[in-house]
Image: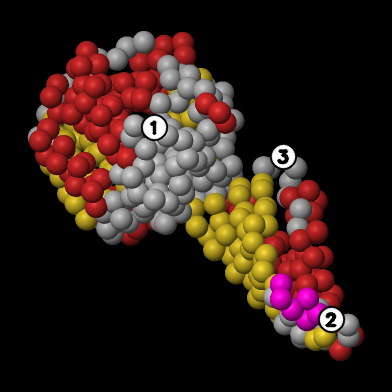
């Protein structure tokens, strides 16, 4: 495996940095401390820094030589609103907040690459180091784009990286095509007529309607969507009545959940079919339904040319440990908004075995510091090969 000597020498610093970030997690659009550290380290390395885009976002720009090509490298900075349950020296000091997805590692790796590239300057062109806030469902990437990210920092290609427990730290997966699903939310209110639980004939029962809807929901994926097209619909929220009034049929029932797809066509289909099923169920029971479908994050689909470039860089660092066949994830990532504005590629970096089942968003999760050197080396290889002098 090929990790530049300068990055190897920097690993003690990057490890301490990653653990400091882990101990001080900040939620989306609240990453003031993290953004301050990122900006300070970039400036100290000689990288031009722009702060405030997307609220707490930071973009560092390094231009070397007269190369015309410009690329963007993205790391997310935010933590999750959940407790950390495992005792470790750098355990979260913020109650109810935790780096349970490895964004602390992503930030440290991209800073390591920026420090190395600023010192060696072995390329010709422009690289934008994009430190994004609020990836975890709060819309950070979309806000950065809306506030002019690609007008201020034009990119001919944009690249993302995420750690993956289960892959060894000396492995990376680089695959063209769909990588992550769209992540959309739906919510339905069934409106009936409340009545005494002993006299249901005098009302219109929304609970029975909601039960029919929920039991029929999976027929959308099982009987409407093309079986060769992956899709997920899950009901994750249900609210009705009062546990202290078990003889009252309520006026309304609310249900909600998530919908996932890899293609725009199936995404459209899920929206239409959830609404159709809700309206049809309501009509069958003589009540009404209000249906809302919130399009949150598009699918992440790797561009062919950008993937080929990423594959070349990965091969230089990981050799035969590059995986070109790896299943997509039904999770979502708003890197998709960046990839809508420039050809994009999103890769999976090994995080080692999932100790005690500690996968992403688990209270026992931790980023594997042994992956820091490999991730930083991948970013450096990508820049030096794509922006050749």
- Residue 189 falls in image quadrant: bottom right
On screen, residue 381 versus residue 231, left or right, reads: left
Which mark is drawn over residue 2?
none
Q: Secondary structure at mark 3?
A: loop
Residue nearest the observer in this picture, 43 or 356: 356
User: Magenta residues: mostly which secondary structure?
Assistant: loop
Residue 244 in the magenta stretch? The answer is yes
- Residue named by callout 1: 88
Asked whether disc 1 touches disc 3, contact meaning CB atoms under 8 Å apart, the reply is: no
Residue 78 in the magenta stretch? The answer is no
* Looking at the image, residue 14 lies above or below residue 282: above
- Residue named by callout 3: 228
Q: Residue at x 66, y 46 (%)?
A: 231
Calculate the distance from the C-alpha at mark 3 to the C-alpha at mark 2: 45 Å
Determine crowd level at label 2: few under 14, some 14-19, many 20+ residues with C-alpha closer than 10 A.
some
Asked whether disc 2 touches disc 1, contact meaning CB atoms under 8 Å apart, the reply is: no
Counting residues from the N terminus, which is met first, the one under dot 2 or under dot 1?
Answer: 1
Counting residues from the N terminus, which is met first, the one under dot 1 or under dot 3?
Answer: 1
| Magenta residue span | 243-248
Does residue 302 appear anywhere in the picture? Answer: no
Q: Position of residue 207 (x, y in %)?
A: 78, 72
On screen, residue 62 versus residue 325, left or right, reads: left
Q: Secondary structure at mark 2?
A: loop
**Labels 3, 2: front one:** 2
* Looking at the image, residue 149 lies above or below residue 122: below
- Residue named by callout 2: 197
Q: Residue at x 39, y 50 (%)?
A: 95
Determine crowd level at label 1: few under 14, some 14-19, many 20+ residues with C-alpha closer than 10 A.
few
Residue nearest the observer in this picture, 345 or 53: 53
């Amino acid at each position: 495996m090929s990790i530049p000597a300068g990055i190897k020498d920097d690993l003690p610093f990057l490890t301490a940095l990653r653990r400091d970030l882990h101990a001080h997690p900040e939620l989306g659009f609240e990453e003031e401390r993290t953004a301050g550290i990122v900006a300070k380290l970039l400036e100290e390395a000689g990288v031009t820094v722009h702060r405030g885009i997307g609220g707490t976002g930071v973009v560092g720009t390094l231009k070397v030589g007269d190369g015309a090509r410009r690329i963007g490298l993205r790391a997310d900075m935010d933590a999750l609103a959940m407790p950390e349950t495992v005792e470790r020296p750098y355990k979260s000091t913020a109650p109810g907040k935790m780096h349970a997805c490895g964004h602390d590692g992503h930030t440290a790796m991209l800073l390591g690459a920026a420090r190395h590239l600023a010192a060696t300057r072995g390329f010709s062109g422009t690289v934008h180091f994009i430190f994004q806030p609020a990836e975890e469902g709060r819309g950070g990437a979309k806000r950065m784009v809306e506030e002019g990210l690609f007008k201020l920092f034009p990119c001919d290609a944009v690249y993302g990286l995420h750690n993956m427990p289960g892959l060894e730290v000396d492995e990376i997966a680089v695959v063209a095509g769909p990588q992550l699903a769209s992540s959309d939310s739906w919510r339905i209110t069934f409106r009936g007529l409340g009545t005494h639980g002993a006299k249901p004939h005098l009302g219109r029962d929304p609970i029975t309607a909601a039960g029919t809807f929920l039991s029929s929901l999976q027929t959308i994926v099982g009987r409407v969507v093309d079986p060769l097209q992956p899709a997920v619909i899950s009901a994750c929220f249900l609210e009705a009545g009062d546990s202290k009034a078990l003889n009252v049929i309520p006026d309304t029932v609310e249900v909600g959940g998530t919908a996932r797809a890899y293609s725009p066509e199936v995404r459209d289909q899920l929206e239409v079919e959830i609404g159709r099923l809700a309206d049809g169920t309501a009509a069958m029971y003589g009540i009404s339904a209000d249906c809302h479908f919130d399009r949150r994050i598009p699918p992440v689909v790797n561009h062919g040319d950008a993937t080929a470039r990423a594959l070349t860089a990965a091969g230089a660092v990981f050799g035969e440990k590059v995986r070109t066949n790896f299943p997509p994830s039904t999770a979502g990532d708003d890197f998709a908004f960046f990839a809508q504005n420039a050809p994009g590629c999103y890769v999976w970096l090994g995080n080692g075995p999932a100790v005690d089942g500690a996968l992403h968003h688990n209270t026992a999760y931790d980023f594997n510091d042994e992956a820091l050197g490999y991730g930083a080396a991948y970013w450096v290889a990508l820049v030096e090969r794509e922006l050749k002098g």
